Structure formats: C-alpha cells, structure tokens
Amino acid sequence: MKEAHLIIDIGTGNARVAVVSPGGELLGIHRENIIYHKDGHYPEALYFDPAQLWEQVCRIASCAAKKAGDITVLAVTSTSQREGIVLLDKKGNSLIGLPNIDHRGREWESMIADQSRVYQLAGRYPGSLFSVMKLHGIRRRREDIWRQLDSFTSISDWIGYKLSGIVGYEHSQASETLLYDVARKCWSDELCDLYQMERALLPKLVDSGTVLGIMQPDAAEMLGVSREARVVVGGGDTQLAVMGAYPDTDDVVIVSGTTTPVIKLTDCYITDRQERTWTGRHIDAGSFMFEANAGVTGLNYQRLKEIFYPNESYDVIEKELSELRDFQCIASLGSLLADEKTPLTKGGFIFDAPVSHQLTRAGFVWATLWDIACSIYENYNTLYSVSAHNKDYVWACGGGMESHTLRLFIAGLTGKKVLMRGNYRQSSAVGGSILCNRALGHEEAAPGLPEVVMPGSGTNYLDFYTEWKKTRSSLRQIFTT
C-alpha cells in the first residue's frame, strides 16, 4: 500500500480533497461545489451549513481515496479560503459558517474612527471582507446565534477541530480577522477593544506544520482513514499554494485561482503609507506575505468559458487564441487594482462598430485574459513601488495558469521570466503535503526543475496596456457618473 497524505481544501467555489504522496505526487482528487444560502437579515449576506459541508468533505474524501487506490494515510491537513469562519457554541457545536464572500458587516464598515491604526496593527485596511465584521453583523442582527456564541475559528482550523476535537487558530488565518497583531504574531487586545470583541472568543494560536492531535474515532471512520493518522495544522489556501511553488525570500508569486493574489515573500513586516496593500503571516516561523490582490479574475474566465466554449477544452481555446493576429476587442471585468479607492462593479467589452466579421469568440477570451494580465501587472507595480523586486523572474501557480497565453502576457508585461513547478495546478495540495512531511519529521522531496516562459519579443504589449487603461478609465467614468 502506498503511503499518502490527505489534503482537505475548502475554496470559495468548491470543496476538494487531494491524496498526495509524501514525495508530492498527486494520487487522487475529487471536488464538489459548496452550497451557500442567502441570509435575509442583510443586503449582502451568505452562509453555509457546517453539518452539510462536513458531510460533503467526508464524501469527497472517500471518492478521492478510491481514485488513489490502495493507500495508507499518514496525516491529514486542511486549508481554506481566507477570511471565512465557523462559529461554535459552548458544547463545541457548529452554529453557522460564514464564507469570505459574506458581507453582512458592510453597513458598519465605518464603525472604527481611526482605521489607519487598524491597518498598522492588522496589516490590511478594514472592511466587510474580514472576519471580525462578519461577527459584528451577527451581533447586530442575529441575536439567536450571538447569545450561543462561545468561540469561532477559520474554516481550515474548523476542519482540524472536526478531525481532532481540538480548537485552534493558525497564524496565517488569524491575520485575516482584524483582531491579530501581524508584526507581533499574537492576538491584539487593542484591536479586540476597538471592535468590542471579548478576548475569550479567540482560540489559542497554533503553528502551521505541527501535529494538532490524532484522529477522532468518528472522523476516522467517516473519512475511511486509520485512527493513528496525525492531524496536522494547515493554513490559508494562498499560503499553501505559495509554499507549493518552493519560492525563496523576496520572490514574487502569482496565485491564479478564483481571485489572483500577487505575493512578495519577505522576512520583515512591511506596510504601505498609502494603505493599499496587505501584509499577513506566511505559514513558516518568521516570514510575511506582502500582497496586492487582483480580485475576481479566474472566476470571470471560467464563466466566460461556459458561455463561449461550453463543450470545448482549454486546449481548443489556446489553439484559437494562437491563431489571432491582432486584438479584436478590449475588456474591463471588475478586477481590483490596489491604487483604486473603489472597485469597479460593472464591466464590459469594447470593440469597433459596426461589428467586424473578424471578431470571434477567441477575441473575447483574449480580452478577458488580457484584463487579468494587466490587473496582475498593475498590482505587481504597486508592490514594487513599496518594496522593490529585482529578480529576473516571478513564480506562478494555480489553475488559471493553465492558459499559456496568460503566462505569455504576464512575462511580456513584467519583463520577467514566469516559472512554474510541475504540479502548479494543485499547488496548495503540494503545500499541504510539505506541511505533513514537516510535522511527521519526514525528509522533504526536492522540487523538480520549473517550466520557464520567457518574455516575448516583437509584440508591443505596452501599446495594448495603454489601450486597456483607457478602456478601464472610460468604463469607470460611465458607471460612476
């Protein structure tokens, strides 16, 4: 029987379980969409049923294990969307799950007078995305839940709790709560006071890549693994994906998933005087992730593929993209730029009228990928303006990087080589396997040589980039006047 680690990953759109060998080989994977429900107490509130999600996780794990064949699971770890939380009562029962896309705290975003102080301590400008504002929304309008609340934790740490019976909060996930002092690596009494949150609500902090405990008998039975398997503390999905790329300090990593964080790994706490960036804890002992995020990008691409290429593979798309001789339209689809104070909530395509016979479905996809690449480039430049990046390459990982065209765009705009490891599509699963190996004291597998995409020549990317900026500016003007 093959030895393996089980990596449970709760993303924004779907839950998946990967079976990975200690050497980083993907043995099996299965996924299902997460079911969200609207909460009518708020304009922008979504939640999930923790019991329903746990049933999904157990079912998915069983399917992934069957695909992997005869295995012995040595360790199980978990990762999840950042900012999402699960609320617990005094008996340890799960009350409600609040995903990162839940904005029930939007109405109270301005409750803190000195928001710059929050940025200095928490490393991100406060907003309804972050966990404490979800809690505040519960306190204001869901008294039925609030009076039962005893504790809360991140979704990945909640999975760890379901597996081991031990409640903890891992540091990279704690960075997303606005209750954590990122520089000092601890819960912040000052931030708790500002948000009027009881310190007793906060679980003990636990270190990623350490053994949380052993499998609870019922959890072991439901997942079909040995009771002797170790439960390993995981972390945020972006952090695990970054780890799976095997970068060095001061490297930049682009993680192309539902959203696209642009990350620089640093060994010191960095903040931006203009308060445009985030700084959070990475999942090793002393590193930080200095970040700007291009927002919803991969999800745009996925949904437009369903419209233009519902029955075709990504290979067909890439073939048609390679046959384009010039761009047929330009797009702005609501990606985030760190330099912009307010996000674009409307988007669109602009092309010549009357509609040219040369305009094809590939032209719309080209424009979508170009919008993603330009957004990445803008956010990269914001990071560079605060903390210079002088290496001649960037790392890339995540399912969005399956598009060779997108990689070429990024290389062309940044003037940097784009490097990718062999398992770049499942980089967070590789990162989870690394954590399991560390927790068990096993030797880590050496990463293979990366694939390299060189900056191209002969294409005037900067002219296209200027056209994109004009399009984005025009759409902003239309929809904000």
Image (spheres, helix red, strand yellow):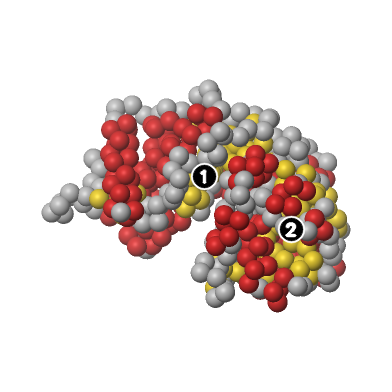
| Residue 219, picture quadrant | bottom right
Marks 1 and 2: which is nearer the front?
2
Residue 30 on image: x %, y %: 60, 62
**Residue 221 horizontal side relative to residue 330, left or right:** right
Query: Residue type at mark 1?
Result: Asn
Residue 188 on image: x %, y %: 76, 46
Residue 143 on image: x %, y %: 69, 74
Between discs 1 and 2, the one toward the N terminus: 2
The relative height of residue 132 versus residue 269 in the rendered view (above or below) is below
Q: List the residue tagged with mark 2.
A: 197
| Residue at far left of view | 354
Q: Quadrant of the N terminus?
A: bottom right
| Residue 52, picture quadrant | bottom right
Query: Residue type at mark 2?
Result: Met
User: Residues under labels 1 and 2: Cα distance?
Assistant: 28 Å
Determine which of the numbered discs, if any, sits on residue 427 in the image. Answer: none
Give the residue drawn at x 74%, y 61%: 152
The relative height of residue 279 versus residue 351 in the rendered view (above or below) is above
Quick check: can you spot residue 25? no
Q: Quadrant of the C terminus?
A: bottom left
Q: How many marks?
A: 2
Residue 441 on image: x %, y %: 83, 41
**Residue 308 horizontal side relative to residue 40, left or right:** left
Question: Could you tell me which secondary element the residue under label 1 belongs to?
Answer: strand
**Residue 140 horizontal side relative to residue 43, left or right:** right
- Report the front residue among 142 and 174: 142
Determine which of the numbered discs, if any, sits on residue 293 in the image. Answer: 1
**Residue 293 horizontal side relative to residue 67, left or right:** left
Give the residue drawn at x 28%, y 33%: 463
Give the residue drawn at x 55%, y 62%: 107
